[in-house]
Image: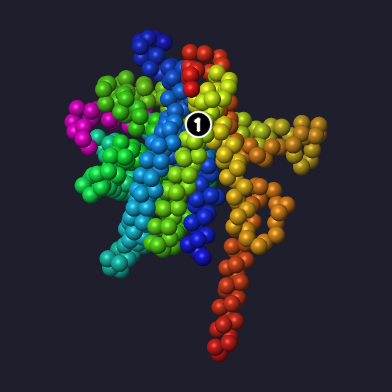
Amino acid sequence: MGLLSKKDAALIKDPLFDNNPITIQVLGICSALAITAELKASIVMGLSVLFVLGMGNVVISLMRNIIPSKIRIIVQLVVVAALVIIVDQVLKAFAYELSKTLSVFVGLIITNCIIMGRFEAFALGNGPWKAFLDGIGNAGGYAIILVIIGFFRELLGSGTLLGFQVLGDPIAKTGVYALGYENNGFMLLSPMALIVVGLIIWVQRARNPKLQESH
Amino acid sequence: MEHLELFFKSIFIDNMVFATFLGMCSYLAVSKKVSTAVGLGAAVIFVMAVTVPMNWLLDQYLLRDGALAWLGPEYADYNLGFLSFILFIATIATMVQLVEIIVEKFAPALYNSLGIFLPLIAVNCAILGGSLFMQSREIPSLALAFNYGISSGIGWFLAILAIAAIREKIRYSNVPPALRGLGITFILTGLMAIGFMSFGGMLTGDNPVPEAPVEETATVVEDKKEELKEEKRADVISYNDLNK
């Protein structure tokens, strides 16, 4: 990492795994899980949050000395809402089908707790460059979990990845379907997203006992 | 009938937590004890009952395509829909502040029990989600919007109450160490959500579809609705014929 000092690199790397916003900090689950039935939607959602959190952290960090602390929540909400409107309009213009799938969940990025949490915990106390790295790191950690969930749900639920049939054709019985494999339609339903997250947490904490809770 | 249907539908079938994952952050963070869960749940019901109708009015008379027609014919072409996120969240944030001030003034006892939770609610996704779903599902009247706000709030309340009770009990169970805390809570929520999915058959009423697989329930409900609409239409037509 020639570009970044060691401290700056840690800002990006920590939230990706050991301090992941979803599995460790328990932030931003709200708008995430409902749209992970398809890998494509998960990736777009991850990128949208990456944009909003990266930009938002910079804006808030630039304004941190002029925001009166009493009304900071409203100021933060307005900044996020403005950025989310940009994302929403871009999606509607260039990926209309996808923006239909995501429906209100794009709007719900506004109340995604990761964003408010990082504004409060980091951007209000640090310079713009650091805040930007922190935003990218946290949104990256969020996106990674989303992509993992989306990958398993789409693969097991409909036998496709990004819309391509990777396991063969379920109607013509080719590929693994010739062996009697069936798609598990249950994976496409919302409760399975929660269970997949539970399993991800299980794997992560089993590998790293430091993260385990007593209760 | 319409009201009753929407009421049960938003509590059980479209439950905020189990069907759409809204308000998960506070759902996971504040569900360690039943008493605090009840406090937050009550605050959510209250705020949703206020903000959803407010945002319905905003949507109806300011934001949707052609909503400004009441100002005069030259305004009929405006569509301010892209502003809805910012206006909805501003309404919610100010309403929460207002509610906090009013409750503090007139019901100090309630304020003391809800106090800490009220500011938290501004960033609870269930609240904004309620308003956005109200907009995208095109709820037709103010009374229905009020009904929708209250019943989604009650659904959220039930969910957090149930998980808090389970978490209080599960402390005595022998959960694998890596699953303790967050992991088991997620899996429990998933299992509860599967349970809540069985309510999906509720609105099919006397329509005998016991063998329908779970995924198809939603479409069955839609079909039934279509049928009902058509029956109504047929009724109206025959009624008109009689009048002639």
Between residues A112 and A9, which one lies in front from this camera angle?
A112
Question: Looking at the image, which residue is at 63% across and 53% down?
Answer: B201
Q: Chain of mark 1?
A: B
Q: What's the residue at 40%, 62% (across, down)?
A: B143
Task: Let me know if residue B170 is in the magenta part.
Answer: no
Vertical order, B2 against B192 (above or below): below
Residue with the most extreme bottom position? B244
- Above or below, A7 against B54 in this view is above
Can you say whether B240 is above or below A49 in the image?
below
In the rendered view, does A112 fall on the left or right side of A162?
Answer: left
Is residue B94 in view from this perspective? no
Nearest to the observer: residue A38 or residue B174: B174
> Left of B24 or right of it: where is A199?
right
Hey, what amino acid is under mark 1?
Arg
Residue B58 shows up from this direction: yes
Start-end of magenta stretch = A54-71
Q: Quadrant of the N terminus of chain A?
A: top left
In reply to whether residue A57 is colored magenta, the answer given is yes
The one nearer the camera, B105 or B3, is B105
Q: Position of residue A23 (x, y in %)?
A: 48, 25
Number of marks in picture: 1
| Res. A56 image quadrant | top left
Tell me, what colour scheme is on the image?
rainbow
Residue A146 is situated, as x and y percent measured from the top left of the image, at 52, 30
Which residue has dot 1 on it? B167
Whole-percent x, y for residue B165 in the image: 49, 36
